[in-house]
Image (tube, grey):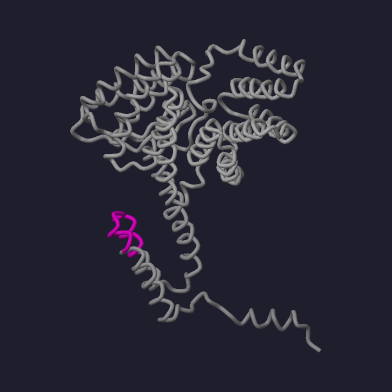
């Protein structure tokens, strides 16, 4: 019996492609594929690539037995041209400002300088410096882009947050109301919902309970029709704030229902939203505390404290606030020694902070409301100026 290996070897030795021209069908297939792809690239603006590919199709269709030699570099070229080059172009475009040709480049540079200045000041806790720089930026943006531009709304939103940090709630409220009007006219639903969330917090701080409820409910309604938005951090934040307000109005059952919705979404939030996740858990603990379900509440406080320490920006402030809330529960239980220990730890934590807690400024500890804010807590919209970058 002859070896199968020998038979296989003999069969292959009788095949020679060195002088075998490709069939007409192979030639037509190559021309059809390369010509069509080249034409597509030509008409989509990549003319050099398109012409080169069509010429390659012509030459490869007439090549004598060199199909494999043509196919390998062609495959490599296709990979680079289809994936790597467009990616490089996109990356480069992301760093290039989309500037109206009629705008003075010096104005664009000054806008970016002032933006960096006020966001940097905000990051370092210099609220007064951030407000001053943002006011200069606001004037320049209004001059360059107009008073109703989304870029103006972005800075107004940030100014409202900065004013709130200083306890100037009435000024922050009027600033946020102007922001809302601009965003509503622009049809920016995500920005509008974020602004309604802030307005609700400001109204709550000013004891305007009815207005606060209306703002948070309107923000939720805006996002309810968008499946992607319903899973966002902003949506969770709105649910949490609305739950706080219902709890304050002695409607714990409604508050718990909202918190259950929020809790169901926590697993979908990214890791850098640890602060928001912790806040929802703390709110849940507060509602259970008010219902005198102390054992359950204590478990939620413990989970909230563990998550708060993972918050990227405000871990210490969150932990201090949560310990204050837990101390209230221990007092209600008559466990005064433990309450004093929690308060002492909260005081010690705040000793390293350069901010003053504003108990009534917002219904929850300050947490960035979702993807419309950058890491500095500054909002970002898609406006007429360049896309802003967060550190």
Identify the residue at the far right of this view. Answer: 1
Q: Which residues are magenta?
A: 40-55
Where residue 315 appears, as percent x and y from the top left, is 61, 24
Q: Compared with residue 179, is residue 345 higher up or lower down, i.e. above or below?
A: above
- Report the side of 27 relative to 318 (left or right): left
Q: Residue at x 37, y 16 (%)?
A: 131
Q: Residue at x 43, y 77 (%)?
A: 26
Q: Compared with residue 359, is residue 372 higher up or lower down, i.e. above or below?
A: below
Where residue 30 appears, as percent x and y from the top left, is 41, 72
- Report the side of 81 relative to 16 (left or right): left
Q: Quadrant of residue 351?
A: top right
1 or 143: nearer the viewer: 143
- Report the side of 339 relative to 105 (left or right): right
Principal SS element in the magenta part? Answer: helix
Q: Compared with residue 145, is residue 14 higher up or lower down, i.e. above or below?
A: below
Where residue 383 appears, as percent x and y from the top left, is 31, 36
Q: Is residue 54 magenta?
A: yes
- Report the side of 349 relative to 189 (left or right): right
Q: Compared with residue 15, is residue 67 higher up or lower down, i.e. above or below?
A: above
Q: Quadrant of the N terminus?
A: bottom right
Q: Is residue 116 magenta?
A: no
**Count of residue discs:** 0
Q: Residue at x 57, y 13 (%)?
A: 353
Q: Quadrant of residue 258?
A: top right
């Amino acid at each position: 019996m002859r070896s199968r290996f020998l038979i296989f070897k003999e069969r292959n030795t009788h095949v020679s492609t060195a002088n075998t021209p490709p069939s007409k069908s192979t030639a037509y297939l190559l021309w059809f594929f390369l010509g069509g792809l080249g034409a597509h690239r030509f008409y989509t603006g990549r003319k050099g690539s398109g012409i080169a590919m069509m010429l390659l199709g012509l030459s490869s269709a007439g090549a004598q037995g060199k199909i494999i030699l043509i196919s390998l570099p062609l495959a490599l070229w296709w990979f680079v041209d289809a994936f790597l080059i467009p990616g490089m172009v996109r990356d480069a475009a992301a760093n290039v400002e989309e500037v109206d040709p009629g705008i003075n480049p010096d104005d664009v540079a000054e806008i970016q300088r002032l933006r960096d200045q006020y966001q940097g000041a905000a990051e370092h806790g210099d609220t007064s410096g951030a407000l001053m720089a943002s006011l200069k930026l606001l004037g320049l943006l209004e001059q360059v882009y107009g008073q109703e531009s989304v870029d103006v709304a972005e800075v107004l939103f940030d100014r409202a947050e900065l004013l709130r940090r200083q306890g100037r709630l009435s000024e922050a409220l009027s600033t946020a109301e102007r922001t809302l009007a601009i965003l509503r006219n622009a049809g920016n639903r995500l920005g509008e919902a974020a602004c309604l969330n802030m307005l609700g917090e400001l109204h709550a701080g000013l004891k305007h309970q009815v207005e606060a409820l209306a703002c948070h409910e309107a923000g939720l309604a805006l996002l309810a029709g968008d499946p992607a938005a319903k899973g966002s951090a902003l949506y969770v934040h709105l649910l949490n704030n609305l739950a706080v307000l219902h709890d304050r109005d002695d409607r714990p059952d409604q508050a718990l229902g909202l918190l259950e919705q929020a809790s169901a979404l926590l697993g979908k939030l990214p890791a850098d939203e640890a602060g928001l996740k912790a806040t929802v858990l703390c709110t849940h603990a507060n509602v259970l505390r008010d219902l005198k379900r102390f054992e359950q509440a204590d478990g939620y406080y413990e989970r909230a404290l563990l998550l708060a320490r993972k918050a990227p920006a405000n871990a210490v402030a969150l932990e201090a606030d949560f310990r204050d809330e837990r101390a209230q529960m221990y007092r209600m239980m008559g466990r005064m020694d433990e309450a004093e220990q929690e308060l002492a730890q909260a005081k010690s934590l705040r000793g390293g902070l350069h901010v003053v807690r504003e108990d009534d400024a917002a219904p929850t500890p300050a947490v960035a409301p979702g993807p419309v804010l950058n890491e500095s807590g500054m909002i970002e919209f898609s406006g007429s100026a360049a896309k802003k970058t967060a550190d």
